[in-house]
Amino acid sequence: MAEEEPVYPEFDEYINEQTHLKPLSIRTYKNQYYTLRKYLDEFRSLEEKFLLDFIVDLERDGDPIDNIMISANTLINYITIIIQVRHYHSPDVNNNKELIKLRDKYKGLKLRQKNLKNQTKLEGLPSKEELIHHMNMAYQDGKWRDYIILFLIIYYHTRNQDLDVALVSSIKQARNDNYNYLVIKPSHINFIRFKYKTRDKYGRKTFSIKNQRFRECVDNFIDEMGGWFKDNDMLWLISVGSNKKLSPDSIGKWIRGRTIDKISTNDYNKIIMSDAIDRKDMKLIDEISDRRGTSVPNLLSEYDLKL
């Protein structure tokens, strides 16, 4: 029997009015509110000064139950849900003025933590040239699948999920919007992405790939796999054994086994984006934005290693 959710009228009244929120956001807000209610009474009944002291104590001492330190990002989320619920029940902006100041302080701390982390990563990550050399070595070594994967990461700025691709021989087979596809045509290859992180915002993405080396590796990979399977002429790019599709939970680790220094697809994008920013290559930045499905402002704020 599923455990019943607790009843918190203060929160339920607030969240039921937030009709613009997606289910994932609602679940996130619920988890944050439910966690805080382990320690606090209704937010609307508490003095702002008491809430300020509570958050500062969390920063200094960590979680009183689990005895773990709390990140600046989590503190920001906690303050945000407190402010939102309190503002819903009492809209006077002065009721949360000091909480908003404290949240801004933690946002500054989060940015400093991010900058420190990025500076450390910048010193240890390979260059864009090394990424390309690693990809070309896969070609030299006859690692056709590895080359395909690395090419899509470097030139189409893919995340892990984007690389969960089915190779098919006809556009008629590329209709299931739960999959991504490489459609093998005589003159080019269509890279069709239905399933990726920002699909709700950017929709289906299709790119025509005419790179000859990429095409050679795709053809060699199909031959290496024994050609098209008779019972299902669809080949999985990320697979084990006899065309057995890998589970989504295993894809990230599988891809890291083929990247340089076992770094993530996110690291690849940071390296390539930072290089584009250094060279002030706005054409490439716009291309990264389009191919990845990420706004230019977000790319500039989240993927420049030198920020």
Image (cartoon, rainbow, N blue to C red):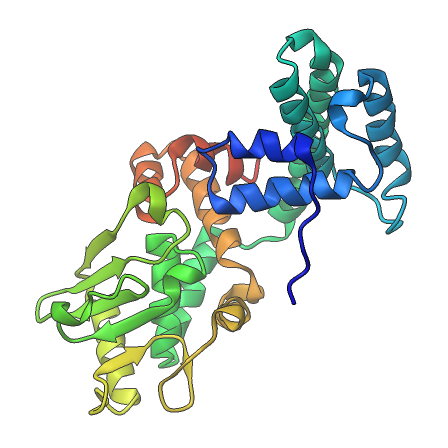
Q: State the image quarter where residue 229 is shown.
A: bottom left
State the residue in front, 98 or 142. 98
Compared with residue 24, is residue 195 higher up or lower down, i.e. above or below?
below
On the rendered structure, is 288 left or right of 62?
left
On the rendered structure, is 245 left or right of 47?
left
Q: State the image quarter where residue 82 is shown.
A: top right
Q: Where does residue 49 sit, x and y in percent of width and height?
A: 85, 17
Compared with residue 250, is residue 226 higher up or lower down, i.e. above or below?
below
Compared with residue 246, is residue 54 higher up or lower down, i.e. above or below?
above
State the residue in front, 160 or 58. 58
Residue at figure coordinates x 31%, y 37% from the top left: 286
Q: Where does residue 185 sit, x and y in percent of width and height?
A: 11, 70
Q: State the image quarter where residue 224 is shown.
A: bottom left
Q: Where does residue 221 sit, x and y in percent of width and height?
A: 29, 81
Looking at the rendering, in which quadrant would you find the N terminus?
Answer: bottom right
Residue at figure coordinates x 17%, y 72% from the top left: 173
Q: Where does residue 13 sit, x and y in percent of width and height?
A: 60, 30
State the residue in front, 38 or 186. 38
State the residue in front, 49 or 218. 49
Looking at the rendering, in which quadrant would you find the C terminus?
Answer: top right
| Any part of residue 111 in sight | no
Residue at figure coordinates x 36%, y 71% from the top left: 147
